[in-house]
Image (cartoon, grey):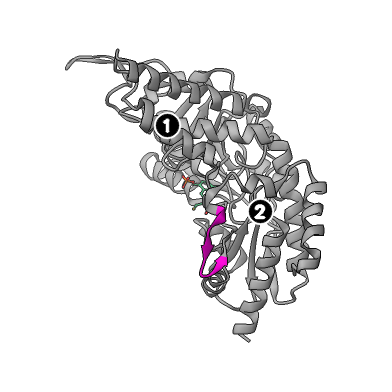
Amino acid sequence: MVTAENALSIKEWNRSASELDAYKLRDDFPILKRWVHGKPLVYLDNAASSQKPQAVIDAIEKVYTDSYSNIHRGVHALSQECTSAYEEAREKVQNFLNAAHSKEIIFVRNATEAINLVVSSYGRTNLSRGDEIVISAMEHHANIVPWQILCQQTGAVLRVAPMTDEGELQLDEYKKLLNDKTRFVSIVHISNALGTINPIRDIIAAAHDRGVPVLIDGAQSAPHTSIDVQELDCDFFVFSGHKLYGPSGIGVLYGKTEFLDSMPPYQGGGDMISYVSFEKTLYNDLPYKFEAGTPHIAGAIGLGAAIDYLTSIGLDSIAAYEQELLEYATRALAEIPEVRIIGAAKEKAAVISFLIGDIHPHDVGTILDQQGVAIRTGHHCAQPIMDRFGIPATARASLAFYNTREEIDALIAGIKKVIEVFG
Ligand code: C6P
């Protein structure tokens, strides 16, 4: 509980605990000054979508105020300026992921579209009846349903690597699933519902031993930990801008050149061609081959600004700070007997799914909202995880570097209120 007496010492703790000064960084996010239902907003729904720093808001405003135009199409000044800004954003993503080439960065709408692109383009071309795709038991629907559709279309088979009661991937079982029929592995880096950090280096290496390509769903990892796609040696990596403190409607597919070059276009239309006649069409080079139509220009530029912002803080500092906050929150929750945490992996990101007795998570979320605390409740688009644990839903607090110990205290106070209300 925060009192006037201990507030200062908690601030000092936060400052000394890591290089990162959450109190100072919060000032960069205008929305965090908001009040909700007469209480200061405590935003703990960052895994669903994170808030935007002023730098991102300014970058988007600047595009529309100063130089907005369509890109790759105009000889006029605005088009040239906007094209440069868009392509600079691609280079920022390239550096952020340490991709070998900027042409390996494809702008899409979100992680979901990036996975669908790979499934449609690579999957339909390379998979056929009896071939196997390996995913894990802790995938988001975005990394299940597209593969199921592909299986229906091709006769390929989906295999699911199991997890333990703690929510850890059973690596041995995963390795046993890899066989001569395996054609693709698609695995989440950090589970959005459990917080589990999967051992993706081992996952990728085991697949590569059999010559099987790997896609990593980085929707929950790219905003919270540094990623080096060359060091990981993943063949595809996907993430969404809106979870990375950038705009919604923009996301990224990274793919190794050797794969992207050999894959057919995902969608046809303007910008993805070099020549069109009614008899035949020649496709554009990478990355444009996969960017049909006018893209989310301001979104890509805003994402570039988000990457600049995050890089200036440092992903390692962010990860270290969020770990400390996770430990603090987990300890505090463990002291409440009615609370049951779902997901206790040793390697865990700052996502806490929990239940309070038999109170429905939606009731938990509603009462917390009245206290100004925003969390997500439901199945988190990961229903097979709920089935695995025999529960319909959880309440989920997901943290970001701008959250503080006082906000965790507000969550705990809110949970106590829930218990009081439901007796
Ligand atoms: N998870 C959550 O509240 P999109 O919607 O395309 O930006 O992201 C899809 C997605 C893919 N993989 C993982 C691991 C995710 O967590 C998500 C999005 C949000 O947990 C919204 S359902």
Disc 1: which residue: 62
Can see residue 41? yes
Kindly identify the residue that appears in the image at 41 percent across and 36 percent down.
Answer: 61
Residue in front for this viewpoint, 402 or 334: 402
- Report if residue 330 lies within the magenta region: no
Q: Is residue 377 above or below residue 86?
A: below
> From the viewer's perspective, is the residue at label 1 or at label 2 nearer?
1
Place residue 412 in its image quadrant. bottom right
Q: Position of residue 105 (x, y in %)?
A: 50, 25
Residue 400's place in the image compared with 308, above or below, is below
The residue tagged 2 is 403
- In the image, 65: left or right of 54? left
Looking at this view, is 300 or 349 the one in front? Answer: 300
In this orientation, which residue lies closer to the viewer: 232 or 11? 11
Q: Is residue 58 above or below residue 43?
A: above
Mark 1: which secondary structure?
A: helix
Around disc 2, counting alpha carbons within 10 Å, would you say few (fewer than 14), some (14 to 19), or many (20 or more)?
A: many
Q: Where does the C terminus fall, quadrant-wise?
A: bottom right
The reply to whether the residue tagged 1 has its Cβ within 8 angstroms of ligand 1 is no
Q: Is mark 2 within 8 Å of ligand 1?
A: no
Q: Which residues are magenta?
A: 32-39
Give coordinates of residue 155: x percent, y percent.
Answer: 41, 41
